[in-house]
Image (cartoon, rainbow, N blue to C red):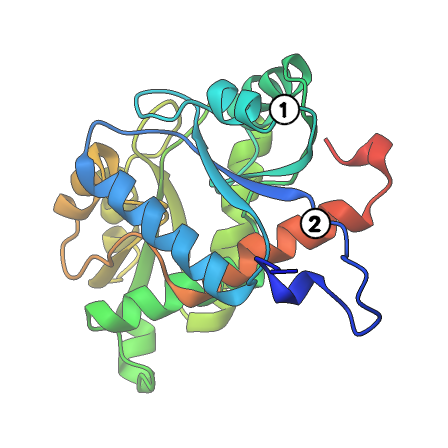
C-alpha cells in the first residue's frame, strides 16, 4: 500500500486521523502585494508543521472568500486563525458568523495580537529599517516609536493595540504611542507631533499591519525618520499562527470562538 503522507502512519501501521485543518483568515486587499504576502506566510506555516492541512480564506476583496474555503472542507474539523492583530468587528462578528453558517466543524482562534511573538516581529522589522539594537543613553532620551495600526471603533481593539504598544516599549526602552489609520485617534501625524512636543526627535513608525496595503503605505509616509515594513511572512508570525491554532484546540470547545 502506498501512503501519501508517511507522517500520519505510526510504527503500528495504523493510519492516524488527520489533524483539524488550519484556515488562515485574511482581511483581503486591492493591493496585490497583500495576497502574495499571505501566501508566503502560508508556506512558512506548512514548513513548520508538515502534514497539517493549511487553507486560506478572505473576508472580502480577494479570492478565495472564507465561505467558499469552508464549503470545500465539507463537514471536516477546522480552526480559523484570523490574520488580524486585535479584537474588533471582524473577529467578533464576521468570522464567527461565517463559521457558524458552514457545514465544517469550525472553531475560531483569537487574533494574533497582543502577543510577545507579535512584538518580536515588530522589533525585527524596526531593526531592519535602521533601529539600533544597542542604543546609547542619548538615543533613548530622544527616541520614540509610533505603533501604526488600522484602527477600529471597538474599544477592545484599541485596548489590544495599547497592550502591544506597552510590550514593544518594554522591549525598546523608549516610549511607544499607538496611532491609527482610520476609525480611531490619534493619527500617526498627531502622535508624531505629540512626541515631538515631549522632546522626542528621533521618531520611528512601526507598521502593525499584516501585509502591505493602502493604510500601511499612508502611515509609513508620515514617518519623520524611519518606518518599518509590515509584519509579513516573518518566522515569528508563522510560529504565532501555529500557537493560536494549538491554543484553540487545547481550549474547551464552548469557549473557542
Residue 191 seen: yes
- Marks 1/2: CA distance? 14 Å
**What secondary structure is marked by label 2?**
loop
Q: Residue at x 37, y 46 (%)?
A: 210
The residue sitting at 47% across, 54% down in the picture is 165
- Which quadrant, please, contains the N terminus? bottom right
Spot occupied by residue 122 in the image (x, y as percentages of width and height): 39, 61
- Report crowding for label 2: few under 14, some 14 to 19, many 20 or more residues within 10 A (C-alpha): few
Q: Which residue is mark 2?
A: 18
Residue 141, given in percent of the width and then of the height, sits at 32, 74
Residue 133's place in the image compared with 248, above or below, is below
The residue carrying mark 1 is 74
Residue placed farthest to the top in the image?
Answer: 101
Q: Return the x and y of residue 102 as percentages of the image width and height.
A: 63, 17
Please determine whether, in this image, residue 9 is positioned above or below residue 91.
Answer: below
Quadrant where the C terminus is found in the figure: top right
Could you say which disc has been placed on residue 213 in the image? none
Amino acid at each position: 500500500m502506498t501512503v501519501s503522507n508517511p507522517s500520519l502512519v505510526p510504527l503500528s501501521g495504523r493510519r492516524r486521523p488527520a489533524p483539524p485543518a488550519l484556515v488562515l483568515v485574511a482581511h483581503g486587499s486591492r493591493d496585490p502585494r497583500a495576497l502574495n504576502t499571505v501566501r508566503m506566510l502560508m508556506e512558512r506555516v506548512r514548513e513548520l508543521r508538515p502534514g497539517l492541512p493549511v487553507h486560506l480564506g478572505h473576508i472580502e476583496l480577494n479570492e478565495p472568500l472564507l465561505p467558499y474555503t469552508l464549503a470545500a472542507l465539507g463537514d471536516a474539523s477546522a480552526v480559523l486563525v484570523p490574520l488580524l492583530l486585535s479584537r474588533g468587528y471582524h473577529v467578533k462578528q464576521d468570522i464567527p458568523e461565517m463559521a457558524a453558517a458552514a457545514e465544517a466543524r469550525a472553531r475560531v482562534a483569537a487574533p494574533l495580537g497582543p502577543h510577545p511573538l507579535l512584538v518580536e516581529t515588530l522589533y525585527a522589522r524596526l531593526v531592519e529599517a535602521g533601529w539600533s539594537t544597542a542604543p546609547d543613553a542619548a538615543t533613548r532620551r530622544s527616541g520614540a516609536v509610533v505603533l501604526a495600526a488600522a484602527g477600529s471603533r471597538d474599544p477592545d481593539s484599541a485596548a489590544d493595540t495599547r497592550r502591544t504598544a506597552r510590550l514593544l516599549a518594554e522591549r525598546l526602552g523608549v516610549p511607544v504611542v499607538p496611532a491609527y489609520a482610520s476609525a480611531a485617534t490619534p493619527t500617526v501625524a498627531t502622535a508624531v507631533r505629540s512626541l515631538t512636543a515631549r522632546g522626542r526627535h528621533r521618531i520611528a513608525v512601526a507598521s502593525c499591519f499584516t501585509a502591505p496595503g493602502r493604510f500601511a503605505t499612508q502611515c509609513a509616509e508620515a514617518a519623520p525618520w524611519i518606518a518599518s515594513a509590515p509584519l509579513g511572512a516573518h518566522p515569528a508570525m508563522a510560529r504565532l499562527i501555529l500557537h493560536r491554532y494549538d491554543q484553540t484546540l487545547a481550549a474547551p470547545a464552548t469557549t473557542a470562538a
